[in-house]
Image (tube, grey):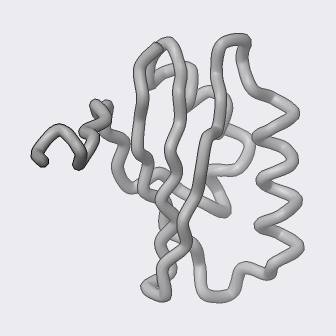
Amino acid sequence: MARFILIHGIPAQATQKEIIDSARQVVASLAPGTEWLNSWFSREEKLFCEWEAPNADVIRASLEPVVHLCPIQALYEVEWIDPQWYE
């Protein structure tokens, strides 16, 4: 399964309720084999999300209902690196 990092812009005027409702919509519409793993929010109104999915198009389709609130600014396929490998 491929792993992805997405960067979303979050409008300053977005309420916590809007963001939570949007997240619930995403979870309810996930395609089989797709998993939203983690998210991090920065003070610069950015949301960084980690996903596993068969491909990027599946993630884009899952996010379609909420891109008006949380537009995708970047989507990267990534590979995990364990810091212990360098000890």
Q: Is residue 55 left or right of residue 70?
A: left
Camera-nearest residue between 81 and 57: 81
- Residue reaching furthest front? 87
How many labels were placed on the picture?
Answer: 0
- Residue reaching furthest left? 86
Report the residue at 59% width, 78% height from top.
11
Can you give x and y, in whole percent of width and height, for residue 16 in the image?
81, 78
Can you give x and y, in whole percent of width and height, for residue 13 in the image?
68, 87
Residue 64 lies, with reference to residue 39, above or below; the image says above
Q: Is residue 22 left or right of residue 21?
A: left
Q: Is residue 12 left or right of residue 16?
A: left
Can you give x and y, in whole percent of width and height, for residue 9 in the image?
49, 68
Q: Is residue 35 left or right of residue 82?
A: right
Report the residue at 41% width, 35% height from top.
4
Residue 75 lies, with reference to residue 33, above or below; the image says below
Report the residue at 36% width, 42% height from top.
75
Report the residue at 88% width, 59% height from top.
21
Residue 30 lies, with reference to residue 11, above or below; the image says above
